């Protein structure tokens, strides 16, 4: 067994501290302490709970995959090491109690589908390269349905684990049409991680445009979801039958009845469906093909968002991890409910998420992830027999909770009366009056933006003295169907007004200085930053945007975009608008066409390999705005896609943000 003495000083085991250990007057944490690669990440228990795997940072930019025996965690077995300047660990997944799989991301390839897959024994032996994510090798693919002892090509990717103790995993094989950069469909197979042999996961044909697969407790594909000409279709098959039956079909954002989520171990399908405007969790009867009349979980004020906890020995659903204003868990099984109470008593003031092994009820230990608004994720092992908690480490150990600002959840009234959810992060130091503030806009835009737990971007800005407002503006997900639909075709319209209203609301609370408010964000948040500076110059004094859309029409016409023809032809026309019938709306609300109106200081950045928002967005806007505004700084990061994956770029960018805000926002004009 390969062991590394270098790990010992990095992983001295200690109990998780119960409270802050630093004074807010201490020297500010560095930019790197927020944005460096997490010092411990991807922490996961083996199926029987005998081992815990994680990625850890070593000296000189090395990252290691480490396995510890949960009964004696003081020593570590190093399975693999990576140079984070070149590659990084993307995912870990136990194949069985003896073998672990891991996905690696090439940092010099911007697209997220360029992933390599490996598997090794837990001591690092019998390592096998299963999938080569380098697209240069895809033409070497052998012909045939059974690939023996060969490395698969980049049109394959890891899908999920199996639960039978075998050496198999489930992989997807992607297929493309002749137009889109992203896959049009996929098919699932079982892959033996020792022999490299590939077998069909099921026999027979499959529905058109099959793309999202759900397996049951035996890792058998049972549900697949497709999107065809704007219709979202869910299809189901019995375990041993080749034919698929549609169980739901409707317009994706209008008449679709439900979204399948998961099977429990006992072959019950659980789905998400709208109930009284909010999404809730329902059972779906596969014998009668009917949705239950009442939900089993609903969360007042929030759409259901959760992950099941399943014991694959007893095939029982034990509980559900939820996200409302913050994380939490509903435990069905009384043993886990009692253990949650003990752990919460030992680690007060934090969200303590219990992560079970696959054989949860029989596992000797539980993995605990503990975090709060001031504390980044920390990990510990809870020994069930003794009740002892042993710390494994923190994702960002240089962060001192006392220096972090507190986060709170609110709902403010927009100008049309709609209640808009928002998170506010306040600096740790006491205020002598209104402070400089930043409206931080999430991307998507049709996603949930944030949660109460520590947010590194908001925490960093608050540590520098800024009040940070993160609106969950209309058009985003997570707060009901009406809230989502209110944002359709409202880029630059009511969605934008929600951001201006958030700033003015923070002023009325006495938190924000009206003369020192900035706006910033990435992707859609970058678009909203530019439009905020253009549309509301009396509110926003400066802006920072990265990977931002600058022209709505260009989203539909760019040949470099990875947006599929399906999305462009249907969902984008529903959510954003029709480039033909809404041409006047696009022109009114495209920053590129109004660049001459932007007079405030602007910091903009883009990745040269961005395919979601291609580089043309940044190039065109930079040329247009700099013709009228000298206070514009533009950065291009090579080998980056839609956002920053390289640690050096992350740190460099946020150092530039800090300097930019110091110059343009911190002091009164």
Image (cartoon, rainbow, N blue to C red):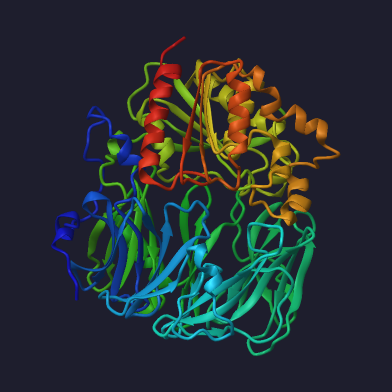
Using the rendered image of the protein, determine whether residue 314 is visible from the camera's viewpoint.
yes
Q: Quadrant of residue 289?
A: bottom right
Q: Position of residue 204 (x, y in %)?
A: 69, 86
Q: Residue furthest bottom?
A: 240
Q: Is residue 10 above or below residue 200?
A: above
Q: Is residue 23 above or below residue 365?
A: above
* Residue at (23, 73) in percent of width and height: 69
Q: Nearer the viewer, residue 615 or 171?
A: 615
Quarter in which the N terminus is drawn: bottom left
Q: Is residue 129 left or right of residue 306?
A: left
Q: Nearer the viewer, residue 413 or 103?
A: 103
* Residue at (70, 71) in percent of width and height: 292
Q: Is residue 408 left or right of residue 249?
A: left
Q: Is residue 524 above or below residue 1?
A: above
Q: Residue furthest top?
A: 669
Q: Residue furthest right?
A: 581
Q: Position of residue 103 (x, y in %)?
A: 42, 65
Q: Is residue 118 above or below residue 644?
A: below
Q: Nearer the viewer, residue 369 or 530?
A: 530
* Residue at (56, 70) in percent of width and height: 139
Using the rendered image of the protein, determine whether residue 434 is visible from the camera's viewpoint.
no
Count of number-bearing discs:
0
Q: Position of residue 221 (x, y in %)?
A: 60, 79
Q: Quadrant of residue 263?
A: bottom right
Q: Position of residue 20 (x, y in %)?
A: 25, 41
């Amino acid at each position: 067994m390969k062991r590394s003495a270098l790990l010992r000083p990095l992983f001295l085991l200690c109990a998780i501290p119960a409270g802050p250990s630093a004074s807010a007057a201490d020297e500010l944490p560095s930019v790197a302490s927020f944005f460096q690669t997490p010092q411990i990440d991807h922490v996961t228990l083996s199926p029987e709970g005998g081992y815990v795997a994680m990625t850890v940072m070593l000296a000189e930019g090395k990252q290691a995959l480490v396995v510890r025996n949960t009964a004696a965690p003081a020593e570590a077995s190093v399975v693999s090491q990576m140079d984070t300047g070149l590659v990084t660990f993307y995912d870990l997944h136990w194949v069985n109690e003896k073998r672990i799989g891991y996905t690696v991301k090439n940092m010099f390839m911007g697209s997220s589908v360029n992933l390599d897959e490996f598997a090794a024994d837990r001591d690092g032996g019998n390592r096998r390269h299963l999938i080569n994510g380098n697209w240069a090798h895809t033409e070497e693919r052998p012909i045939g349905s059974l690939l023996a002892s060969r490395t698969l090509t980049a049109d394959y990717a890891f899908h999920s684990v199996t639960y039978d103790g075998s050496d198999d995993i489930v992989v997807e094989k992607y297929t493309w049409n002749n137009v889109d950069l992203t896959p049009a469909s996929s098919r699932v197979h079982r892959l033996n991680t020792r022999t490299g042999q590939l077998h069909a996961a099921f026999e027979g044909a499959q529905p058109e445009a099959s793309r999202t697969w759900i397996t049951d407790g035996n890792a058998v594909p049972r549900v697949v979801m497709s999107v065809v000409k704007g219709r979202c279709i869910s299809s189901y098959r019995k375990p041993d039958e080749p034919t698929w039956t549609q169980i739901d079909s409707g317009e994706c954002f209008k008449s679709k009845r439900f979204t399948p989520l998961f099977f429990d171990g006992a072959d019950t399908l659980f789905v998400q469906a709208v109930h009284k405007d909010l999404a809730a969790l329902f059972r779906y009867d596969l014998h009668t093909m009917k949705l239950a009349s009442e939900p089993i979980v609903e969360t007042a004020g929030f759409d259901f968002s959760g992950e099941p906890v399943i014991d694959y020995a007893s095939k029982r659903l034990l509980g559900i991890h939820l996200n409302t204003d913050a994380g939490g868990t509903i435990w069905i099984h009384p043993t886990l409910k009692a253990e949650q109470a003990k752990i919460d008593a030992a680690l007060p003031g934090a969200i303590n998420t219990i992560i079970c092994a696959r054989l949860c009820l029989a596992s000797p230990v539980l993995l605990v992830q503990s975090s709060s608004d001031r504390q980044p994720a920390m990990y510990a092992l809870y020994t069930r027999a003794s009740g002892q908690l042993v710390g494994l480490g923190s994702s960002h150990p240089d962060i001192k909770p006392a220096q972090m600002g507190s986060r709170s959840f609110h709902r403010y009234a927009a100008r049309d009366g709609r209640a808009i959810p928002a998170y506010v992060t306040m600096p740790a130091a006491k205020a002598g009056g209104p402070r400089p503030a930043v409206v931080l806009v999430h991307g998507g835009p049709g996603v949930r933006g944030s949660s109460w737990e520590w947010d590194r971007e908001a925490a960093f800005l608050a540590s520098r003295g800024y009040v940070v407002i993160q609106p969950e503006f209309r058009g985003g997900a997570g707060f009901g169907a009406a809230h989502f639909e209110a944002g359709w075709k409202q880029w630059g319209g009511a969605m934008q007004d929600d951001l201006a209203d958030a700033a003015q609301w923070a002023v009325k609370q006495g938190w924000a200085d009206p003369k020192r408010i900035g706006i910033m964000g990435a992707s859609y948040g970058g678009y909203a930053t530019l439009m905020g500076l253009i549309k509301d110059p009396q509110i926003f004094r400066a802006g920072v945007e990265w990977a931002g859309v600058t022209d709505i029409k260009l989203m539909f016409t760019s040949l470099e975009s990875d947006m599929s023809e399906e999305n462009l032809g249907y969902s984008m026309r529903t959510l954003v608008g029709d480039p033909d019938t809404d041409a006047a709306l696009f022109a009114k609300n495209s920053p590129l066409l109004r660049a001459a109106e932007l007079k405030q200081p602007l910091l903009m950045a883009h990745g040269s390999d961005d395919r979601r928002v291609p580089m043309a967005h940044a190039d065109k806007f930079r040329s247009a705005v700099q013709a009228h505004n000298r206070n514009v700084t533009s950065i291009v990061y090579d080998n980056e896609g839609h956002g920053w994956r390289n640690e050096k770029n992350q740190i460099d960018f946020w150092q530039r943000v800090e300097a930019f805000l110091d110059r343009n926002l911190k002091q009164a004009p």
